[in-house]
Image: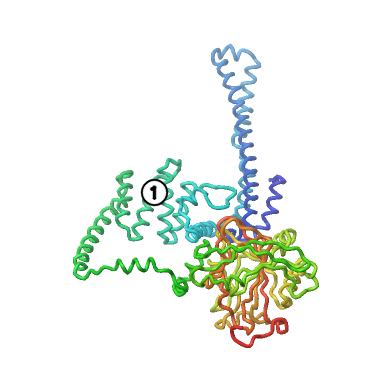
C-alpha cells in the first residue's frame, strides 16, 4: 500500500522519538508528541472522509433503487414488458449489486490502522502515564493544592486551562490505589464522585467510585466514614456483594472500637490531668532558631518551594559605578524568619553592582550586572548574561540528545535513574558548536576559574512536576571515589544558567539556610561548593522544586579543583 506523503514525513519525525523513552521526564520532548497526535488526527479525518464518501455512494444507490423498485412493483409485468427495463434488471442483479457488495466490503481503515500501528511503537508507555500521574500527586502535596483546584485547571500562571473529567479523576485515583496510596486514592475518588454528583456525564457509575472510595477511607482507619459511603453504595446497588459484606464488617469493628473507647475513658478519668495551659503557651511561643533547625528537611524543602517560612525583605538599591550610568534594580533578599534573625548587618551584605572581575579586559568597558542572592553560602546572580539566540541554539542542540537524568549511587557509584530526579539532560562541548566554547570562556572570565578541567556544559529540561530533591553537587568524605574517573578533583563550584521563565514553581532552594532562588530567563547563579580549604560547604545542599506550571530549561557548569591552585589559593582554616 502506498502511504500518503504526510505519513512518510511523520514516520521520519518519529525516528527521532524512537530512541527516547520516559517522555514524562521532559516537557521539551513531550512537545513532539503533540505534533504526532496532530498528525494522527489528520490521518483519522482522512479515514472518516473516505468512510463518508463510501456511505454517500451507497446512499445514492439505495435512494435510486428505492424509487425504481417502488415504481416497478406497482405493475411488475408492465414494467418488465419494456425490454430495456428487463435488460437493466439483469445487469443490476448480475453486475451492479456485485459492485455494491465490493464497495461495502472495501476496507478504508487500512491506511489509518497501519499508520496508527507504526506510531504506537513510539507512544508513551504505562510507565509514562504512571509517572505523569505521580507528578500530579507530588505537585498536589508540595504546593498544597486540593483536588478540585487541579481538576478545574485553576492553577497560577496557566495559559491553557484544562479540566479533568470524571474518568481522569478516577484514573488518577486508580493509579494511587495500585501504589497502595490510599490517601490520594480517597482524594481523587472523592473528586470523581463530586463531579458525578454535580451532574457531569460519564461512562462511570457512582457505585464503582464509591467502592474504591469506601475501601480507601477504611484503609486509613476511618471506619465510620467508610460505613457511610458503603451505605450510600448499597442504596444505589442493594445487591452489591462486597458492599454487603463490608457493611457487616464495618459495623462490627465500630462496635468493638466503641467498647474499647468506653473502657479507656473510664481508665483516664482517674489519672486525667489538663495540659491546656501548657498547650496554649506552646502555640503562642515563637519559633526559635533551634526550632527551625529541627524541622525535617523535607518539610523545609516544601515550605521554601511554596514561599513559606520566608519573610520577603524588599530592598531597592541604586548601584553606581564611576564612568557608567547608574541603574536601579529591585530584588528580594530572602531571610528565613526562624533560622536567622533579620539583623541590619546581614541585610547590609546584599548588594547589586556592575561587575568586571577585577577589570577583566572583556568587561572593563561593558561590565555585567551582578546581584547578591544570599550571604552564607555566598550566592550571586548575573543578569542578562546569556542571549536569547544562545539559549535557543543550546536547546536546539540538546533536544535530540536528551536522556533521562541519572544520579550516582552513593554505595555502588553506578549511574542510575531515581524517582526524586525528574528531568532529562544532555551534554554539549565546543565540538558541537563553537558557541559553547564562547559560553565556557564567559564563565571563566567572570569567575576567574579554569574551565579546562570543568565538566561539559549540561543542559536539563524538567518534565511533568519536574524536580531534583535536596542533594550536594560536591563529593562528600564518604564518597572518596565520586569523581575519581575524571581525575580533576572535587566540584569546587557550580554555575547555573536559567534558560526559561517558569510560570509557577521551579525554584532552586537551599533548605539548610532557607534561601530560595527563582528562575529568571537569561540570568545565571554561581556559588562555591567547597571552602578555600577544600572542605565541603554543607550549607550548599540544594534542590530544584517541582515545576507547577511552565517549562523549565537550565544549563550548568560544574567546575573542578584541578587548575584552580593559583586562581583560588587554599585557605588556612577548615571553614575558610
* Helix, strand or loop for disc 1: helix
The C terminus - image quarter: bottom right
Residue that numbered label 1 is attached to: 208
Identity of the residue drawn at 61% across and 71% down: 348
In the shown orientation, is residue 201 left or right of residue 54? left
Residue 146 x, y percent position in the rendering: 45, 54
Residue 12 x, y percent position in the rendering: 70, 54
Identity of the residue drawn at 62% across and 22% down: 90
Q: Residues within 10 Å of mark 1 (few under 14, many from 20)?
A: few
Is residue 431 visible to us here? no
Q: Is residue 338 above or below residue 5?
A: below
Q: Who is closer to the viewer here, 460 or 512?
A: 512
In the shown orientation, is residue 214 left or right of residue 497? left
Identity of the residue drawn at 70% across and 72% down: 456
The N terminus - image quarter: top right
Picture quadrant of residue 445: bottom right
In the shown orientation, is residue 204 left or right of residue 72? left
Give the number of callouts. 1
Residue 494 x, y percent position in the rendering: 65, 73
* Residue farthest toward the bottom in the current orientation of the protein: 572
Q: Who is closer to the viewer here, 349 or 448?
A: 349
Amino acid at each position: 500500500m502506498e502511504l500518503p506523503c504526510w505519513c512518510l514525513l511523520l514516520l521520519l519525525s518519529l525516528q527521532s522519538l524512537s530512541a527516547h523513552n520516559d517522555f514524562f521526564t521532559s516537557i521539551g520532548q513531550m512537545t513532539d508528541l503533540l505534533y504526532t497526535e496532530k498528525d494522527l488526527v489528520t490521518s483519522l479525518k482522512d479515514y472518516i472522509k473516505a468512510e463518508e464518501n463510501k456511505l454517500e455512494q451507497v446512499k445514492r444507490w439505495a435512494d435510486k433503487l428505492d424509487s425504481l423498485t417502488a415504481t416497478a412493483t406497482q405493475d411488475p409485468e408492465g414494467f418488465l414488458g419494456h425490454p430495456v427495463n428487463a435488460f437493466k434488471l439483469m445487469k443490476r442483479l448480475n453486475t451492479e449489486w456485485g459492485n455494491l457488495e465490493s464497495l461495502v466490503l472495501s476496507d478504508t481503515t487500512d491506511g489509518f490502522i497501519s499508520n496508527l500501528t507504526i506510531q504506537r511503537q513510539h507512544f508513551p508507555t504505562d510507565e509514562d502515564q504512571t509517572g505523569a500521574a505521580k507528578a500530579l500527586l507530588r505537585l498536589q502535596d508540595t504546593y498544597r493544592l486540593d483536588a478540585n483546584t487541579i481538576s478545574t485547571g485553576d492553577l497560577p500562571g496557566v495559559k491553557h486551562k484544562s479540566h479533568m473529567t470524571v474518568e481522569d479523576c478516577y484514573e488518577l485515583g486508580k493509579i494511587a490505589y495500585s501504589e497502595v496510596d490510599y490517601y490520594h486514592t480517597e482524594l481523587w475518588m472523592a473528586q470523581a464522585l463530586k463531579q458525578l454528583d454535580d451532574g457531569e456525564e460519564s461512562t462511570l457509575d457512582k457505585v464503582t467510585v464509591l467502592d474504591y472510595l469506601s475501601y480507601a477511607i477504611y484503609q486509613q482507619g476511618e471506619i465510620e466514614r467508610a460505613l457511610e459511603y458503603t451505605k450510600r453504595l448499597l442504596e444505589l446497588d442493594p445487591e452489591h456483594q462486597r458492599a454487603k459484606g463490608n457493611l457487616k464488617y464495618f459495623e462490627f469493628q465500630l462496635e468493638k472500637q466503641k467498647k474499647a473507647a468506653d473502657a479507656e475513658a473510664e481508665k483516664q478519668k482517674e489519672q486525667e490531668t489538663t495540659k491546656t495551659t501548657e498547650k496554649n503557651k506552646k502555640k503562642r511561643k515563637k519559633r526559635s532558631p533551634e526550632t527551625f533547625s529541627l524541622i525535617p528537611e523535607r518539610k523545609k524543602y516544601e515550605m521554601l518551594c511554596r514561599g513559606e517560612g520566608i519573610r520577603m525583605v524588599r530592598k531597592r538599591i541604586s548601584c553606581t559605578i564611576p564612568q557608567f550610568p547608574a541603574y536601579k534594580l529591585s530584588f528580594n533578599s530572602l531571610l528565613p524568619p526562624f533560622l536567622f534573625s533579620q539583623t541590619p548587618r546581614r541585610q547590609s551584605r546584599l548588594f547589586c553592582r556592575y561587575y568586571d572581575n577585577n577589570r577583566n579586559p572583556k568587561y572593563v568597558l561593558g561590565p555585567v550586572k551582578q546581584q547578591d542572592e544570599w550571604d552564607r553560602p555566598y550566592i550571586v546572580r548575573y543578569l542578562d548574561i546569556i542571549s536569547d539566540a544562545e539559549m535557543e541554539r543550546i536547546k536546539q542542540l540538546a533536544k535530540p540528545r536528551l536522556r533521562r537524568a541519572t544520579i550516582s549511587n552513593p554505595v555502588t557509584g553506578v549511574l542510575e535513574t531515581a524517582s526524586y530526579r525528574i528531568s532529562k539532560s544532555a551534554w554539549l562541548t565546543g565540538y558541537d558548536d563553537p558557541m559553547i566554547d564562547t559560553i565556557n570562556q564567559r564563565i571563566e572570565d567572570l569567575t576567574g576559574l579554569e574551565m579546562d578541567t570543568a565538566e561539559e556544559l549540561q543542559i536539563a529540561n524538567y518534565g511533568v512536576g519536574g524536580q531534583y530533591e535536596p542533594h550536594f553537587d560536591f563529593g562528600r568524605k564518604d564518597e572518596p571515589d565520586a569523581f575519581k574517573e575524571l581525575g580533576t578533583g572535587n566540584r569546587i563550584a557550580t554555575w547555573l544558567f536559567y534558560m526559561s521563565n517558569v510560570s509557577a514553581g521551579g525554584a532552586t532552594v537551599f533548605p539548610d539556610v532557607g534561601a530560595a532562588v527563582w528562575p529568571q530567563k537569561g540570568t545565571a547563579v554561581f556559588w562555591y561548593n567547597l571552602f578555600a580549604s577544600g572542605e565541603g560547604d554543607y550549607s550548599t545542599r540544594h534542590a530544584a522544586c517541582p515545576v507547577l506550571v511552565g517549562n523549565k530549561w537550565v544549563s550548568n557548569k560544574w567546575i573542578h579543583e584541578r587548575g584552580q591552585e593559583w586562581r583560588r589559593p587554599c585557605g588556612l582554616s577548615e571553614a575558610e
